[in-house]
Amino acid sequence: MSRPAFDLSLYLVTDRSCEARLPEVVHAAVRGGVSLVQLRDPQAKTGALIAQARALRALLAPLHIPLIINDRVDVALAAGADGVHVGQSDMRPEDARALLGPGRLIGLSVSTRQQLSAADLRAVDYLGVGPVYDTPTKPDADPAIGCAGLRELAATCQLPAVAIGGIHAGNAAQVIEAGVQGVAVVSAICAASDPERAARDLASIVRGALGR
């Protein structure tokens, strides 16, 4: 079973702040150019998270936009999502692969060269690198690595990489120039008064920086 094709250029990570209008925000963001969506809500109960994931899967599958679930392999399996994204304190990628099988995507967060060298990347499809800048959406995040740290990690890793952490329209081009294949954003879209326009502006900047 082959894994879904994926495009990291504009990666939306959802936020609890838009829970009440989540499908609306995600649909608008995809219309604006979001290429991949991650459902992240560490506070949600399992049943509610599965329901959210199924609703987003029904929305995104006809549009050929992959749905990734943050951390929760069980939710990804129950909802038929396209994969999971795990952090350094979550399930190991190789264990996630054993549960998910070969047909789903696995992303891994890294912040340092030590984390990168310690990971078994044979089970991983892409890396989330950061936080590039300080971000209020994840208070327990590692210290910001800046574009210099991002450039170093991007040059070291052999997998496609998406940058995350404090990225918005004003710095997205600089982040792409550090050598990653895309940017992951939360509040730049979820907190925008017009998510579709915010996504469209970001997509234009990112794809321009990628030379597309």
Image (cartoon, rainbow, N blue to C red):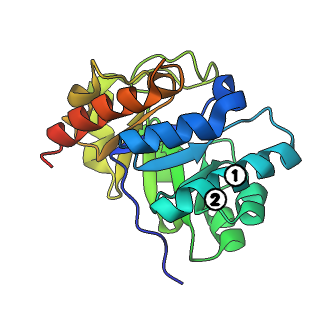
Q: Regarding mark 2 in the picture, which secondary structure is present there?
A: helix
Q: Which amino acid does label 1 sit on?
A: Ala
* Position above or below: 12 against 62: above
* 56 or 185, nearer to the observer: 56
Residue at point 29% right, 37% down?
A: 203
Q: In which quarter of the image is residue 177?
A: top left
View extreme (left): residue: 211
Residue at point 46% right, 50% down?
A: 36
102 with respect to 95 (left or right)? left
Q: Looking at the rendered structure, which numbered label has been put on residue 55?
A: 1
53 with respect to 194 (left or right)? right
Q: What residue type is labelled 2?
A: Ala
Residue at point 70% right, 59% down?
A: 76
* Position above or below: 52 against 125: above
Q: Position of residue 110 (x, y in %)?
A: 48, 41
Q: Are marks 1 and 2 in contact (CB under 8 Å)?
A: yes
**Residue 72 in sight:** yes
Q: In which quarter of the image is residue 164?
A: top left
Q: Regarding mark 1 in the picture, which secondary structure is present there?
A: helix
Quadrant in which the N terminus is drawn: bottom right
Q: Position of residue 185 (x, y in %)?
A: 45, 31
How many neighbours does mark 2 have within 10 angstroms: few (below 14), some (14-19), or many (20 or more)? Answer: some
Q: Where is residue 58 in the image (x, y as percent from the top left)?
A: 63, 59
Q: Position of residue 104 (x, y in %)?
A: 57, 69
For disc 2, the marked residue is 58
* Position above or below: 42 against 189: below
Real-space CA distance between mark 1 and mark 2, rounded to the nearest whole angstrom: 5 Å
